[in-house]
Structures are given as structure tokens and as C-alpha cells.
Amino acid sequence: MGILNVTPDSFYDGGLFSSVEQAVRHARRMVDEGAHLIDVGGESTRPGATPVDADEEIRRVVPVIRALADADIPVPVSIDTSKPEVMKAAVAAGAGLINDVRALRVPGALDAAAEMGVPVCLMHMQGQPQTMQARPSYKDVVSEVVEFLRRRVDEAVAAGIPRSRLLIDPGFGFGKTVEHNLVLLRRLSDLRSLGLPILVGLSRKSMIGALLGTPPADRLADSVALALMALREGASMVRVHDIRPTCDALRLFEAVYEGTMR
């Protein structure tokens, strides 16, 4: 999953793809490099990020999604949002998946996602982006994440979203300390008990900086390494900024461990 943030304040690529032309060009490059899906986001959810209203988020993402559809980008486009209004507008413009860091907990989001009839990724987050990293606390982070996702899956199914259209994401960095993230990665296979595809986002995140002291711009190799670890531990898809190096590493990984090449 290639990350396409059309935001001014995302932690790594904020402001780089603010025009529709820049966004489409970057999406096409990611597809050429091997992306299977493009994830468009119009609101930063980094720790401490300032919220934006639905109208502003729609203004940012809908022209880009529509332009990607018009450009015949040959992979699905997902919308990274928690707001039901944005979900509806994005899917109407051509998005084929909803990627929600709040797991459809915003009022109206469950009904909107069910109405849209597209796949949905449900992510775990403790707290809200503005404060989630203040004092994250768990008795057992893995079991609590699994149980939260189990409940959200059940609620989504009850709302009319077929289980076959659901993905789950443990939410690395969303209300979790570095140690929480490491335990989650180490025990990622525990999420397989839910029987759903697992999406993982570790690309250039602050846990790398905390462990290695590198700024976001210098976390490429570290991000690729974490992506491979996640795939080895059970992830079905990785959400990344850097497609070509991740795909190249994955092809080598598969050649060594599985005898296959993508």
C-alpha cells in the first residue's frame, strides 16, 4: 500500500503532494514501482496533529481521487479517513476501500461504510491523535488490541459489512510506547486468530527514531527492515512511503525463504 498524503502537516511528506498534478504523478510512480494499492489521506493523524473539518478534508482528497480514476491508475485507491461524510464523498469519487484509524467509531461511520459497500480496514488506536502518546497504558497490549479489533469486527458485521470485506490493523504508534510496538510486532501472528488480512504501517515512524536516533528522512533502510519483519510475522499488506526499495527487498526475501519472485 503506497502512502499518498495530500496534507500540509504529515510527519514525513506533508506538503509534498499538495497539487492534484503532483499527487497523480507520485501515485503513478508508486504503481510503476510495484504498489498494489494507493492510500489517499487528507488529514494528518500523527501525534499532536491538528484536526481538520470534513469539508476541508473533502476539498483535499476528492479532486485527487477523481483525478486518479480519470488517469486510469491500474490499482485500487483507498481513503484514509474516519469521517462518514468523507467516506461517502471519496467512494463516490472512485475510492474502493476505507482505511479508518478510528475503526468506524465516529458517529455515522459504521452506517456510511456499510452503505458504501467497499472493503474497510479497522485500526486500533488508544486515545486520539492529539493526546494518544501522552501516557499509553496496557496490561497486555497484544490481547487488548486483539480484543478491541474482535469487538469492532463484530460491530461492523452487525452493521451490515460482510466479514469478507474487512481488514485489521494493530495501529503501530497510535497510543503505544516503543515497547508496546515491539511486543506487537513480535507477536503479530496473534492477530491471525481473527481470521482476517492484517495491514501494518511502520514506515518511517517515530519508534525508529527512538531506537536508532534517526530523523524521518533517514529511516528508509530501517522502514524496509520493519516491513519485512511484519510480513514474516503474519502481515498481509504493508503501508509504506517507499515502494521500490520495499518491493525489491520483498522479492529477495521471497527468493530466499519461499523460492518465489513477485
Image: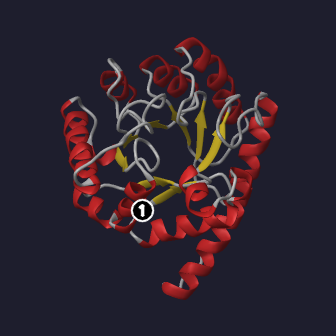
234 vs 155, left or right, is: right
Q: Is residue 185 left or right of residue 67?
A: left
Task: Please tell me which residue lies in front, 156 or 205.
Answer: 205
The residue pinned by badge 1 equals 182
Which residue is at 54% across, 25% downward? 90
Q: How many marks?
A: 1
Density class for disc 1 (Cα within 10 Å; few <14, some 14-19, many ≥20) is some
Residue 66, image x and y in percent? 66, 27
Identify which amino acid the numbered label 1 is placed on.
Answer: Leu
Quick one: quadrant of the C terminus? bottom right
Q: Is residue 64 shown above or below 3?
A: above
Is residue 88 visible to us here? yes
Query: Where's residue 174, x and y in %?
Result: 44, 42
Residue at the (35%, 48%) spot, across then down: 168
Depth order, front residue of 40/149: 149
In the depicted structure, whether residue 83 falls above or below residue 236: above
Q: Residue at x 36, y 56 (%)?
A: 197
Query: What is the image's colouring?
Result: secondary structure
Residue 262: tell me if it is visible: no
Task: Name the foreground residue: 180 vs 74.
Answer: 180
* Spot occupied by residue 75 in the image (x, y as percentages of width and height): 60, 48
